[in-house]
Each structure stands twice: as structure tokens, then as C-alpha cells.
């Protein structure tokens, strides 16, 4: 799964997070891709060719993203590659979160992988 998270500095903090999510199978084939809001009060449930929904929630407190697939749960702060689910996360660009004067919101890229 590859997630590009967007934070729109022109929206209130309860509505400012969204993400573009791409799911791929073991062979690298895209099995789902969607854009949606991932705010903590309204998590994004993504359908794909997988049997269960992938649920993605952006968290403002401690700045992380939560992932859920069936009973499997992990966050963007889970980096231990020996675990069943883990992430390799980037950082915000621009680092200060941007301002409300640009055409597009700043982005952070999270690549979430599980074995």
C-alpha cells in the first residue's frame, strides 16, 4: 500500500486531512486506488479487490496515520520490519505545513507494507 497524505492548511483541523491510496498485490498489480478524507472523526474505508475494507485514519494528535485491514492494525509509526505490518514513512513537504496561499496542500508520503 502506498499512501500520499495531504493536509490542507485552508481547512479546519477536523477536516484538513485526505489521502490518495494505491493498493497492489504481490505481483505489483494495482488492485485498488482511491482518494478520500482520512480525518480522525471520519475514517476512510477503501474498497478494492481484497475481501475486506482497508480503513485509513489520519490522527492530528502525535501526527500519525492508522491502518486497519480485518483484524490487522498498524500505524505509520510502526517501523519494525519483522512485524506482520509496518511502515516506511516520509515527512511533510514543506516541513512547516504550508500556508493557505498555495494551489495545492502540502503532502507527506507513507509507504505501508505488510508481509
Image (cartoon, grey):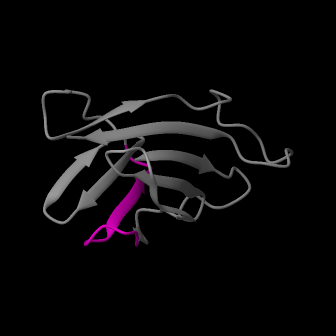
**Residue 7: percent from left, percent from top:** 61, 49
Majority secondary structure in the magenta region: loop
Is 48 within the magenta? yes
Could you tell me residue 24's position as x and y percent? 41, 51
Q: Position of residue 43 (x, y in %)?
A: 40, 68
- Pick the front one: 63 or 91: 91
Relative to 94, is 101 on the left or the right?
right
Q: Is residue 72 left or right of residue 1?
A: left
Count of numbered badges drawn on the protein: 0
Q: Residue at (30%, 67%) from the top-left corner?
A: 50
Q: Above or below — where is 6 with respect to 88?
A: below
Q: Quadrant of the C terminus?
A: top left
Q: Which residue, as the protein is rendered here, is positioned at the far front?
A: 27
Q: Foreground: 91 or 32?
A: 32
**Magenta span:** 47-61
For the point 72% across and 37% down, the residue is: 98
Q: Which residue corresponds to the image point at 36% horizontal and 45% vertical from the top-left?
A: 27
| Above or below: residue 68 compared with residue 45 | above
Q: Quadrant of residue 110?
A: top left
Residue visible at 56% across and 37% down in the picture: 108
> Which is nearer the eye, 25 or 114?
25
Q: Is residue 98 magenta?
A: no
Q: Position of residue 85 (x, y in %)?
A: 21, 42
Amino acid at each position: 500500500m502506498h499512501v500520499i497524505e495531504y493536509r490542507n492548511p485552508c481547512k479546519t483541523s477536523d477536516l484538513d486531512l485526505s489521502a490518495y491510496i494505491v493498493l497492489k498485490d504481490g505481483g505489483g498489480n494495482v488492485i485498488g486506488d482511491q482518494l478520500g478524507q482520512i480525518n480522525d472523526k471520519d475514517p476512510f474505508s477503501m474498497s478494492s479487490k481484497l475481501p475486506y475494507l482497508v480503513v485509513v485514519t489520519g490522527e492530528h494528535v502525535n501526527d500519525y496515520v492508522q491502518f486497519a485491514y480485518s483484524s490487522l492494525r498498524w500505524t505509520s509509526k510502526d517501523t519494525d520490519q519483522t512485524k506482520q505490518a509496518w511502515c516506511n514513512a516520509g515527512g511533510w513537504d514543506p516541513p512547516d505545513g504550508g500556508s493557505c496561499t498555495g494551489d495545492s496542500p502540502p503532502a507527506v508520503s507513507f509507504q505501508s507494507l505488510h508481509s
